[in-house]
Amino acid sequence: MWHSLVSGNIMASNPEWRKTEAGWRQVFSAWIKSGAPSALLHASIFFDIRCVYGSEAPVDALIASMQRDIQKNSVFLATLTRTALATKPPLGFFRHFLLESSGEHKHQLDLKHQGLALINDLARLYGLSCQTYRAATLDRIEQAIREKLISTDTARNLIDAWDKLNGLRLEVQSQHWQSTGKASAYLDPKNLSSLERKHLKTTFGIISDVQDVAQQRFLRGYS
């Protein structure tokens, strides 16, 4: 994500992203009304807004305005859902891992973009549907439980999947750093025990199942 923000110049140093509350309201409203890929990309980044310094009142007002606009526009959530579900966990039909076929990471899995990012996207969809806004992934899932947008069992499984993937990613990154001096979220499944591989497949399966649930909820009635 950090690399994407830098490469896309989505930084505080860019004057385009330094706006007043009214300016941000106008931009957020335009993104919600637009189905353009760039608008969806920006929404997936900027709608994770939170206050890090100063008064929270302008941010709270902006979030409230954003939520009202989203509630009035089910097409936006449907379009965002299609984008979020376009990437699937790396499991084949017979539950074998779908590994990178070429390049530097041949025969490896991307735990970040093929795992954690998919859960973050799902949490964002549910979070934007909630009446009460939450910014963090796990907080969004918990809020979706409280507002009965997702079943407790489904949500708890997704939280467990996030915890397991995050722990495995940190372990893999640490190993890469110690051996190469670089951090990487890519994993060769051969380096796992048979039990660990089974658990990882189960984790990816949970993500796939929740994607199906989200598709039914947010895309029902849309072709």
Image (cartoon, grey):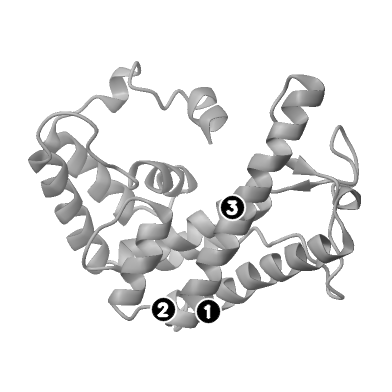
Tell me whether circle 2 and circle 3 mark residues in contact (CB < 8 Å): no
Tell me whether circle 1 and circle 3 mark residues in contact (CB < 8 Å): no
Residue 116: assigned label: 3
Q: Is residue 131 left or right of residue 198?
A: left
Q: Which of the marked residues, 2 or 1, is nearer the chain's N terminus?
A: 2
Mark 3 is surrounded, within 10 Å at the Cα level, by few (under 14), some (14 to 19) or many (20 or more) other residues, namely: many
Relative height, residue 179 to residue 101 (above, below): above
The residue labelled by disc 2 is 150
- Which residue is nearer to you in this view: 149 or 20? 149
* Residue 19: % across, % down: 20, 28
Q: Is residue 139 left or right of residue 115?
A: left
- Asked if residue 163 shows in the view, the reply is yes
Relative height, residue 146 to residue 3 (above, below): below
The residue labelled by disc 1 is 213
Judged from the image, the secondary structure of the residue bearing numbered disc 1 is helix
Identity, as a three-letter code, of the amino acid under mark 3: Leu
Q: Which of the marked residues, 1 or 3, is nearer the chain's N terminus?
A: 3
* Residue 207: % across, % down: 61, 67
| Cα separation between marks 2 and 3 | 19 Å
* Residue 219: % across, % down: 47, 76
Front of the two marks 1 and 3: 3
Judged from the image, the secondary structure of the residue bearing numbered disc 3 is helix
* Residue 5: % across, % down: 48, 29
